[in-house]
Image (cartoon, rainbow, N blue to C red):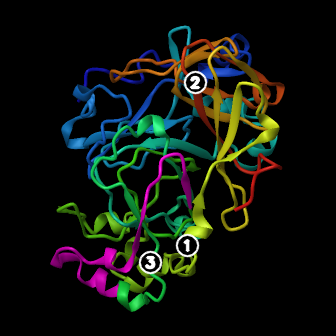
Amino acid sequence: MSIVKLDEDLVNKDSVSAILDRALDAGEGLLRLTPTWVPRSFLHPGRRIKLFPGDLYAFGADRGGIDERWFSSTTEAANEGRVWHEGLSFCLFEGKKFLLKDAVSEAGKRLIGSPIFDKYQRWPVYSKFFDNMGPIPHHMHQSQKDAELVGREGKPESYYFPPQYNNVDNNFAYTFMGLEPGTTKDDLRKCLENWNKGDNGILDLSRAYRLKRGTGWLIPPGVLHAPGSLCTYEPQWGSDVFGMYQSIVEGRYVPWSLLVKDMPEEKHQDLDFIIGQLDWEKNVDTHFKDSNYLEPIVDTSASGDGYTDKWIVYGHIDGEQLFTAKELTVEPGKKCVLKDPGASGWITVQGKGTIGKLALQTPAMIRFGQNTEDEVFISHEAATRGVTITNTGSEPLVGLRYFGPAVHANMPTK
């Protein structure tokens, strides 16, 4: 275990109120966040999320390499052997840290707005960089109905492939998604029956799509997908449930326990139940790409001289606007007033500048436990009032930000 602790100088929940008020007042509604690193024991880090190579196993080699960085997260990572705060974002002010989760509990309406706080009593979404050397197993995330069977929440998610974090493709820049039209449940059942015989052949039933930088996808719950090796920005619902349906990936065995970890224990050998957790119609959709592929769309109402705001994640999942994301580019020497109808989590992916009174700087390399100036939580009060963003560098200043549910009345449809 690393001697560096991400939760050093932590203010406990009962004492958050005073420091939170000072931080919000000093930042005019903006909160500085520190990097939140998450390892995965069954994956190989892609080495593109700026973490110092010697720190990839800072949680311990037994925990696996760090291949994810989570943004503005109040969601815990569902990892075996996890540290207590794994997946949770820390706010930083005057050298002290406090959990964004505790801040939302303390001042939810000020931070995330009354509609979201009144309905969910928390920030119900998060985003992350997901960065791997190769593909991961064909898997799905449970629907809300199925996740509730084990006391969890479902997880729809989305992808965007930022060019700034994809200087190389790594080993397999293709993602298998869904199942070939015409695939039957008996076909899939045979794959599950063959789990211990080697490669269970589930990819023979699917189709791979080449990943394109600067584009993205919507992934509804219950839809199989095997993310490829581009570094991915992933706005998603605040849950970490999944089920792996592929028995071997890149020669590595996937234990049955990772298929059924978020299913009722008495159903762990019930193949009909396991297959039934898939949204079959969405998986075999004959127009899967048309239904789920996302090209960026310029928001002309939020763009102007020297700055461009683009929709990168948009559309409905099962009729609901659950999360959205935008990419703002400010040219050198330019500024803009960013005004949104709701709170967002911001990560800087290129350049330097300022957001309100806070500095923005894209790091070249980050040591585990080091604080950076690239991540900010934009509160509801700051977003609706307007925040000035200025490019003070010689290259474009680019930031990604994601939003909670039902925020945008002018969101493009999908």
**Chain part drawn in magenta:** 189-218
Residue 85: which numbered mark, if any?
none
Q: Which of disc 3 and disc 2 is earlier in sequence?
A: 3
| Magenta-drawn stretch contains 67 | no
The residue at the point 79 percent across, 40 percent down is 300
Q: Which residue is nearer to you in this view: 261 or 190?
A: 190
Q: Position of residue 67 (x, y in %)?
A: 34, 41
Type of amino acid at the residue the image marks with label 1? Phe
- Quadrant where the N terminus is found in the figure: top left
Q: Which of disc 3 and disc 1 is earlier in sequence?
A: 3
- Tell me which corner region of the image, top left, top right, bottom left or bottom right, holds residue 140: bottom left
Q: Circle 2 sits on which residue?
A: 396
The residue at the point 16 percent across, 79 percent down is 197
Q: Circle 1 sits on which residue?
A: 288
Residue 388 visible (yes or no) = no
**Of the two numbered discs 1 and 3 in the rendering, the one whose residue sits closer to the viewer:** 1
Q: Circle 3 sits on which residue?
A: 179
Q: Is residue 46 left or right of residue 243?
A: left
